[in-house]
Image: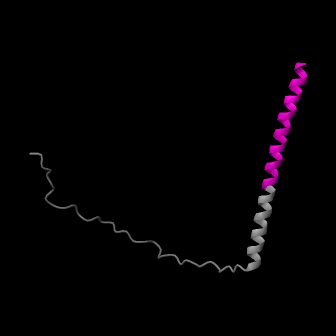
Amino acid sequence: MFLPKYPDNPTPPSAHTHAPADPMPVRRSLPSVSIDQKTVVALAVGGVVLTALLAAVAITAISVAVAAVVLRSLLREQHRR
């Protein structure tokens, strides 16, 4: 009663068969890049310099923020008198 009824004939094969338009494209390899010791040293020095600059900007921002808080506190005390 609750069993599904299957068709007598299986579904016919499709009339359209898929054929690729172009054969597989030829992949070209990238030229090899040689990395010597001078390149590694230059990258390391550049990384150190950029890190030092970032640290200098961060320290400057913190010192400006502290100075602003101190000046604000001093001006507030002077205004209350």
Question: Among all residues in the image, which is located at the extreme top?
Answer: 81
Q: Is residue 71 depicted above or below 59 in this figure?
A: above
Q: Position of residue 54 (x, y in %)?
A: 78, 55
For the stretch drawn in magenta, the main secondary structure is helix
Give the answer, above or below, for where 71 lies relative to 5: above
Residue occupying the point 78% across, 54% down: 55
In percent of width and height, residue 10 lies at: 19, 61
Q: Residue at x 80, y 44 (%)?
A: 62
Q: Nearer the viewer, residue 14 or 66?
A: 66
Q: Measuring 70% from the left and 78% from the top, which residue is drawn there?
A: 35
Q: Is residue 21 depicted above or below 1 in this figure? A: below
> What stretch of residues is rendered in magenta?
54-81
Tell whether position 72 is magenta. Answer: yes
Looking at the image, residue 19 sits to the left or right of residue 71; the answer is left
Q: Residue at x 81, y 51 (%)?
A: 57
Percent position (x, y) of residue 5?
13, 52
User: With 72 as the anchor, is 35 left or right in this view?
Assistant: left
